[in-house]
Amino acid sequence: MQLTTIWFALIAVLWIGYFVLEGFDFGVGMLLPVLGRSDRERRAMINTIGPVWDGNEVWVLVAGGATFAAFPEWYATLFSGFYLALFLILVGLIIRGVAFEFRSKRPGSAWRGRWDAAIFLGSLLPALLWGVAFANIVRGVPIDAHHQFTGDLFTLLNPYGLLGGLTLLTLFLTHGAFFLALKTTGDLRTRANALAGRLGLLAAVVAVVFLVWTQAIRGTEVTLVLAALAAVALVGALLANRAGREGWAFVGTALTIVLAVASLFVGLFPNVMPSTTDAAYSLTTTNAASSAYTLTIMTWVAAIFTPIVLVYQGWTYWVFRRRISVDQIPADSSH
Amino acid sequence: MSPLDLSRWQFGITTVYHFLFVPLTIGLAFLVAGLQTAWVRSGNERYLRLTRFYGELFLINFALGVVTGIVQEFQFGMNWSAYSRFVGDIFGAPLAIEGLLAFFLESTFLGLWIFGWDRLPRLVHLATIWIAAIGTALSAFFILAANAWMQHPVGYQLDTAAGRAVQTDFLAVITNPVATITFPHTIVAAFLTAGAFMAAVALWRLWRHPDRDADAFRTAARVGAVTVLVAAVLVVVTGDQQGKVMTTVQPMKMAAAEALYQTEQPASFSIFTIGSLDGRTELFSIRIPDLLSFLATGNLNGRVEGINDLQSQYQATYGPGDYVPYVPVTYWSFRLMIGTGALAALGALWMLWALRKRDLPIGRWVLAVSVVLPLLPLAANSLGWIFTEMGRQPWIVFGLMTTQAGVSPGTSTAEVLISVVGFTLLYGVLAVIEVGLLLRRIRGGLPDTASPGAGDELGRPAAFSY
């Protein structure tokens, strides 16, 4: 296999890892005002993702850095082109990250309410906008002969792009609700379970329409199989949830995200950013790539260190495997 | 303003802001790890309480360092896409490696540290803060290696057909002499910053509440002050080496640091100068003879090339153009960096003297030192960073690409205006909140919790959880 193909696959893996991991903590963030009825409930919800959200977020930094290193043209065109969308994502990630750390450092409902709003918005904006961005990458955007994006923010807000945003949003909501059902106890767990079922149905409808549309734009046999498997995984997740098997339900939405995003990347290949202006201007795995020397170095680095990262990140999830009960949150709100 | 000017302002604002938090994070991570080690080894509860007190301050600061760091990685592509296309083959690798090797370590092990007090065995838990600290230092190395390539490109070939620089020697890139000297200089400056912070907070506690936990805070004040002094010596040693590397690879930057227009042998160093506004004419100056020669070459009689000679040399090499950085900024940032750093060391020295007896000398001095001391290294760090980046101008990659040529060609003024205003406002608000929270925690004093694991049978989250 060519180095450029390996790196295309690695970048797909990094984005998939990001969406599977940060997907559930975005979901938890968006569900905060919906499922968290009291400060203690909201605090319990935040503590389910407390030890892991920051590590999850690093996946996007590595995806961005790896795109810069392996496909500089892709990185440059995408990041300069999708300027305002990325600015809004950054604002969301900033207020959200700070909110997790700062929220419980002071008592007071006004203080905490503002940070809860920051967590909600800071989870919703990136979830929606990453979906919009990826749908547009797949669909193609106006790119000129110099690999320059020639549209603006509104170019991205087309029906297919918005549907992509909605798909990721509803998938993350479902994924997050399953995670909460898996990690909490009592009333909160019951409500998360019930809500997950309803959200899952919504996500299934939106995702199926989006994947069928995608199939019409960039479909191949492989993307069809992957998309169909993604749908099966989502149905399986809903059935598991109904049976009260939250672990399997969570695995189900994780698989749904893996398969759906994989189908997008497979559909994209060998392009990385198709141009709607002229197919000849499209960025591909070869014309956007770094030199073979750099890709070789990076392959070694990735081959050695990625398994180590996976082991210790996996260990974190093992250490914090226990459910969190609202009763464990001290009634006194400040510590 | 053009997208170029706005993008430069945005990069300056977001980078200097980010770099307020980073050195404190790096230094405090190690100091907190040291305090926790002292607790694990001695069993003395004083160290545990100090660990948790400074640990919380560290985390409040860390949060802002992390979130503002994401902006840094994105804006190369967002605002400097032409630069990104040109350097990606070389510059992208250290950035990606920084994420894979350092960010994952920091974030994962810090999560384990924050939430793991009652989940992990004591020694494993101690290891998590050390690993997180090492992660912060690794991160500094890779980002400085990337920056060093902009100051002094090595290990590359120009691919003129593709219009980009292509990496030929990765080892040369990460052992760039600029990187290998800038890294220790930055790390010891981080220790100086964190030492000053730790000492000043302890001093304020001793001044405000002399009867509460005085023994613990005297320890913290001494540890902090000694850290500052040791770090200050090392900052001077590494800075001296760095100056010599800089003179070799970027002589214009050294000339601009002194506003030295004519080549001199020997060259004097001016402590203070009043010049015309463009910095070209000197009206009044206090000078130390031969010092610049020594800083630049290690020889009191060394020859230091002036701006005018270098400008003609650069014109001969790179074609017509103005290759002189904005001298007033380089001149003053260089001096004030040294001056504020030296003042911090003096403050620490005074503290050690003041703490030699049981009772603190009462007076406004104590308060003044505790307020000003932590700000001095922050100023020195910012000024050093501003100096090294402004001193590289007009280049974005020295000798290969100008800053002007690196900006994103398709990004509109409106877009950049929205982001520069948005980030500035958001960062301003967050700074106020962060300082408020830090002061609140400092006023709260040492936590009372005898054991952080209290209540683990109930599975209660530790006091450090969100």
Image: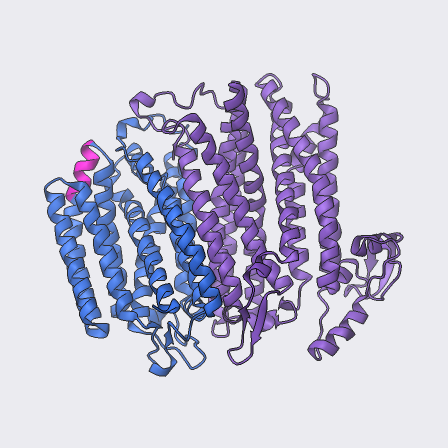
Chain colours: A blue, B purple
Is A254 located above or below residue A206 in the figure? above
Residue B15: image location, x then y, percent: 56, 55
Residue B433 appears in the picture as rendered: no
Q: Quadrant of residue A216?
A: bottom left
In the picture, measured across the screen, residue B231 lies left or right of residue A36, that is right
Residue A210: image location, x then y, percent: 20, 65
Residue at 58%, 39% in the rendered image: B27
Q: Is residue B52 magenta?
A: no
Residue A85: image location, x then y, percent: 39, 63
Q: Quadrant of residue B14?
A: bottom right
Quick one: quadrant of the N terminus of chain A?
bottom left
Which is more toward the observer, B363 or A280? A280
Q: Which residues are magenta?
A: A186-194
In the picture, measured across the screen, residue B402 lies left or right of residue A331, that is right
In the picture, measured across the screen, residue A51 lies left or right of residue B37, that is left
> Does the magenta stretch mainly form a helix, a strand or a loop?
helix
Q: Is residue A193 magenta?
A: yes
In the picture, measured across the screen, residue A85 lies left or right of residue B296, that is left
Residue A34 appears in the picture as rendered: yes
Residue B466: image location, x then y, percent: 38, 35
Is A35 located above or below residue B397 in the figure? above
Quick one: quadrant of the C terminus of chain A?
top left
Which is more toward the observer, B55 or B164? B164
Which is more toward the observer, A227 or B82? A227
Residue at 24%, 43% in the rendered image: A179
